[in-house]
Image (cartoon, rainbow, N blue to C red):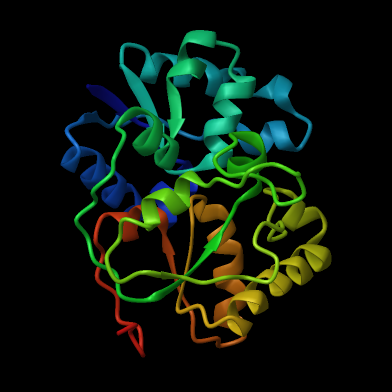
Amino acid sequence: MKVGLFIPCYVDQFYPQVAIATLELLEKHGCEVHFPKNQTCCGQPMANSGFEHLTHGCNDLFVKNFTGYDYIVCPSGSCTMHIKEHLGVPQLAAQCYELTEFMTDVLHVNDLKVRFPYRVGLHQSCHGQRGLKIAQMSELNAPPFSKVEQLLSQVEGLELVTLDRKDECCGFGGTFCVSEEALSVRMGQDRVYDHVRNGTQVLTAGDMSCLMHMEGIIRREKLPIKVMHLAEILNGAKVGVTEPVA
């Protein structure tokens, strides 16, 4: 299985450990992973700001970089959804998967063989949940499901924290956090303090952009919560967090 590894530009610049964890995780589960070195931004920030007509260069480069693979895998729901909804190349859109949906729907992973003995709070990012349908929305009268929780349940020692409101937006929203800074921060505080109230030790999500937003609040307010991408936990990362779960 030949996989093209699609790494969001902000992950490449600020969170390379997430890219490395994604690479290692895919290789552990039998994928032949390739990383096109001249990939750049997918164009999502421009499209989100109303300038999709300026993304043609990003689109052309993405097609050039990722044509020829069996699958394209990305550790970001928002960037994945942008490619699937806005690239305009049906074949590549069908081949593009967010990491956790790829692991559940294509690789059918059912035994991760990793241990992470901490209380983990899961943030359900909007693009993954409502766009890619990775988890059911709580406002619907429908059977619940979560592909992310399906994977986390395989991690030995992990205790998934029950939140008061488990699928509200964190307020990041890409360029929304710039244009509506005060509202974005307040929404982020609401999400973070839900985790604080319920004893989260490690806050995780499938979108590092959401985690970046909430980590800024956690650091500024000196809260005792560690932030990690799902790929790091599923890959068996080691982390120094106090009071591990017995």
Residue closer to the observer: 41 or 117: 117
Give the percent coordinates (x, y) of residue 118: 36, 76
Can you see residue 17? no
Q: Is residue 198 above or below residue 86?
A: below
The part of the image, by quadrant, that contains residue 29 is top left
Quarter of the image with the C terminus in it: bottom left
Q: Residue at x 46, y 41 (%)?
A: 8
Give the percent coordinates (x, y) of residue 185: 74, 69
The part of the image, by quadrant, that contains residue 15 is bottom left
The part of the image, by quadrant, that contains residue 115 is bottom left
Q: Residue at x 60, y 36 (%)?
A: 133
Q: Residue at x 35, y 38 (%)?
A: 103
- Tell how many labels: 0
Can you see residue 208? yes
Give the percent coordinates (x, y) of residue 101: 44, 36
- The reply, left or right, for residue 114 in relation to residue 98 is left
Give the percent coordinates (x, y) of residue 204: 47, 62
Residue closer to the observer: 245 or 175: 245
Q: Is residue 235 above or below residue 3?
A: below
Q: Residue at x 40, y 40 (%)?
A: 99
Q: Is residue 26 above or below residue 233?
A: above
- The reply, left or right, for residue 188 in relation to residue 36 is right
- The reply, left or right, for residue 129 in relation to residue 207 is right
Quarter of the image with the N terminus in it: top left
Q: Is residue 11 above or below residue 232?
A: above
